[in-house]
Amino acid sequence: DAKTTQPPSMDCAEGRAANLPCNHSTISGNEYVYWYRQIHSQGPQYIIHGLKNNETNEMASLIITEDRKSSTLILPHATLRDTAVYYCIVSDPRNSGNTPLVFGKGTRLSVIA
Amino acid sequence: SQTIHQWPATLVQPVGSPLSLECTVEGTSNPNLYWYRQAAGRGLQLLFYSVGIGQISSEVPQNLSASRPQDRQFILSSKKLLLSDSGFYLCAWSVRNPGAQPQHFGDGTRLSIL
């Protein structure tokens, strides 16, 4: 079972920031938070990951609360191409090789023109 | 840069027929390799993972098998397909070095069993 809870769907206006929340209240100290997205009929695309500090890359920003029990993925300027299902996953990288990514149902983000 | 290739993109097979799906990774060495399946409207299920040539671990008992004949080649097979084998099959790779390395997915094979 997925260790994360996400809203099933969200809408965002094109050009605005999309803020996708994720709860992971049972996260352990060695588990990282990973975000992926899946556009219809394609494989999941890695977006970003973090342990406890906020992270930013060319795609998005990841904000992790101080207690690490929740996080928010921020797409700063959403475009129509960002419409996808977004998955928040927690995983312990120490199990390198035998660590499956447990994908829950994710959040279906619809970017609206 | 690293790339992952899966083929075919779509496949329609009759019940009881054999299966062979291939996945190759370029631009890296000694990757961890994974096979996932996604049933319609559901999350991803890990089927197999491999940390090296000839080393295969199975997560779910089924009529599927996997092999890794070369470092960057991962094959998913079946001798006799079942209706329940329909789904979206995804191959993924990650760097083997310790650390929080993400998994990177191919574009998948959509398998329909008739």
Image (spheres, coloured by chain):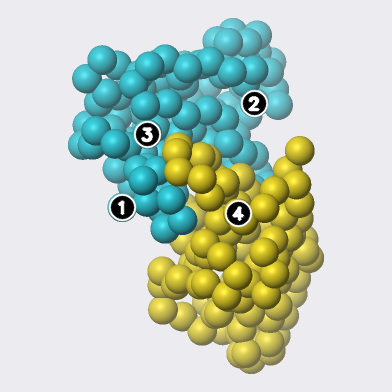
Q: Provide the residue designation for mark 4.
A: B31
Q: Provide the residue designation for mark 3.
A: A32
Determine whether the residue tagged by mark 2 lies in a helix, strand or loop. helix
Which chain is cyan in the picture? A
Determine whether the residue tagged by mark 3 lies in a helix, strand or loop. strand
- Exactly how many numbered labels are in the figure? 4
Query: In x, y percent, where is residue A113?
Result: 69, 15
The residue at the point 29 percent across, 36 percent down is A30
The residue at the point 46 percent across, 80 percent down is B62
Q: Can I make out residue A1 in this image? A: yes
Determine whether the residue tagged by mark 4 lies in a helix, strand or loop. loop
Which chain is yellow in the picture? B
The mark closer to the camera, 2 or 1, is 1
Identify the chain of the residue marked 1, using the numbered disc in the image: A
Q: CA distance from mark 1 to mark 4?
A: 26 Å
The residue lying toward the viewer, choosing from B70 and B3, is B70
Q: Can I make out residue B92 in this image? A: no
Q: Amino acid at mark 1?
A: Asp
Q: Provide the residue designation for mark 2.
A: A82
Mark 2 or mark 1: which comes first in sequence?
A: 1
Q: Are marks 3 and 2 on the same chain?
A: yes
Figure check: A72 above or below A37: above
Figure check: B77 above or below A75: below
Q: Splitting the image into 4 quarters, where does residue A25 fall?
A: top left
Query: In x, y percent, where is residue A79?
Result: 68, 18
Q: Provide the residue designation for mark 1.
A: A1
Q: Are marks 1 and 4 on the same chain?
A: no
